Every structure is written in structure tokens, then in C-alpha cells.
Image (tube, helix red, strand yellow):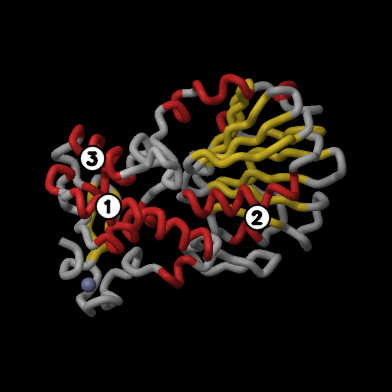
Amino acid sequence: MPELPEVEIIKKGLDDKIVGKTVSDIEIKVPKMFQGKKDDVVGAKITSIERRAKMLIINLSNKNSLLIHLKLTGQLVFDYKAGDKSKRVAGGHPSKDWVADLPNQFTHVIFKFSDGSVLYFNDLRKFGYVKVYKTGEIDEQKVLRELGPEPFSKEFSVDYLMRIFAKRPRVKIKQVLMDQTVISGVGNIYSDEALFCARISPLRLAKDVEKTELIKLVSCVREILQKGLKYEGSSENTFVNVEGKQGEMQKHFQVYQQTGKPCPECGTKIERIKIGGRSSHFCSTCQK
Ligand SMILES: [Zn+2]
């Protein structure tokens, strides 16, 4: 699933492509993936795009907003002209739909703009969604209301984590970090990398983490996300989109998906274990 850096990169990619465009039609092929009334969107102009945690919010001139969650396999693909993929801009799950003729069987929602350009929402597994809300009411929606602070905000601090950890003493730190109600936008990739950076084992219980370690952890979470942004996110499979760009963070992973490879610090083989149903990668020598 795209995490904070990947969604931020998608937002930036779409910013100068769709802001200012007027939605002339929406084709909905899978109804559960577009929740709302088409009439609340068609005819409106896109005024801005925001990222919140791992989600995108597209604001419209008619005081409505679209909340988009790409979940595990969602992609947003923009073509300047329907049927012309030569100048395509894409973001999300890296499958070969990036370069395929669209729409195809994985295209579930199509936004058409008045200038002939199109935005395709593709999703292999159909867990992603677009939901339409009034702009003034979007922050009240449960999925946004319950989010923890953004990692670069001042609310995300050592004191904040101490309070959170005290409330979840017996939960493993990896699970606490991935909980969107604790920190917005951190998932499997960046929690593994941040814990390695802070030299804390993902198995450690929240109650056993010292304050000095939390100081390190807060700065590591930010450092790792910055790194993800710098390398334009990670692409788990090899692909090049038609602009010839791909995220390069995967070339800089220290532990994530490095199972069996030597730890860059000490040479111990990186291990992979399951925590809360998710894979966790770590060095058992460096991380205690
Ligand atoms: Zn190591």
C-alpha cells in the first residue's frame, strides 16, 4: 500500500495536471468504488488536492470534495487525451497497467475532463474507493477524524508517543507505529525502516521502550519519510512509467524486503517475521 511518501508524490504529480480542470463526466464501472452522486461532481472544477495520511482529497469548486483511498493496489493514471498514453502520468500500485491501453478490465472509475483529458482509477483488487463529501464536512468523517497526527507536525512528539505507548503497554512497537490512529501515513515499509534507524526491535512491547529511544524514534520516523520523499517513494516491482520515472526508495531500503541479505551495519542476516499479520524485517543484532 502506498504510504505517506508515495501518496505525497502522487499528489504532486497530479497537482499541475488536474487542478483547474472541469469534470465533464464520470464513468463508474464498479459502483462500490464510487460512493456518492455523480451530479455532485460533474460540472465542477478541481480547485486543489491535499494529502491526508495515505489518502487524497480532491476539492471541487461546488464545495464538494472527493476522498480517494488507493488501498493495496489502486492506481491513478492521467492521460492528456483519451486513447493517447504517450504523455501519461501515473501513481500508485506498480503493475503493467501503467503502460497498458486504458481503460481495461482493472479500470473501475473514469473521470473525464472538459479539455479531453482523463483520469483513470484502476484497482486490481478493488479495495480502493472514491467517496464524495461536502468539503465542510469531510474532516468529520470517521476515517479522517480518527487519524493520528501527521509525522511532520509538532503534535507528533516524544511526549505524545509516551502517552500513546502508556495506553498500549502490551502492544508490540511495530503494530503501534503502523496504527493510523497513532501516526498518519506510516505503514509497513517506513515502520520497518524507522525501527532499524532507531535500533529498536519491532517485537519490543510499548511499555519497555525508553524515553531516550523515543527521542531517536521520532527523529528516525521523520528522517526515513524524508528519505522516501527524496527518492520519490518506492516501487516494489520493477517498472518505468512512460515519463521514464519511478520511485527509487527501494534501492535504499536497509531492512524492508531484505530478508537473508546482510545487515548494512553489522552483516547479520536480515530476518523476516510476522507481527499482527504483517511481515516485519529487522536485524536481530542491531535492533534490541
Ligand atoms: Zn545489524
- Please indicate, yes or no, whether residue 25 appears anywhere in the rendered image: yes
Q: How far across and how far down the image is residue 77, in percent?
A: 67, 51
Q: Quadrant of the C terminus?
A: bottom left
Q: Which mark is residue 215?
A: 1
Name the one closer to the observer, 4 or 118.
4
Disc 3 marks which residue? 162
Judge left or right: residue 278 versus residue 187.
Answer: left
On screen, residue 244 above or below 7: below
Question: Dots 1 and 3: beta carbons under 8 Å?
Answer: no
Which one is earlier in the sequence, the residue at label 1 or at label 3? 3
Which one is earlier in the sequence, the residue at label 2 or at label 1? 2
Which one is earlier in the sequence, the residue at label 2 or at label 3? 2
Tally the numbered discs: 3
Question: Dots 2 and 3: beta carbons under 8 Å?
Answer: no
On screen, residue 288 above or below 132: below
Residue plotted at (55% across, 59% down): 94
Mark-to-mark CA distance, 2 and 3: 39 Å
Mark-to-mark CA distance, 1 and 3: 10 Å
Q: Amino acid at mark 1?
A: Ile
Q: Amino acid at mark 2?
A: Ala
Disc 2 marks which residue? 90
Element marked by disc 2: strand
Judge left or right: residue 285 versus residue 164.
Answer: left
Question: Dots 2 and 1: beta carbons under 8 Å?
Answer: no
Q: Amino acid at mark 3?
A: Met
Mark-to-mark CA distance, 2 and 1: 37 Å
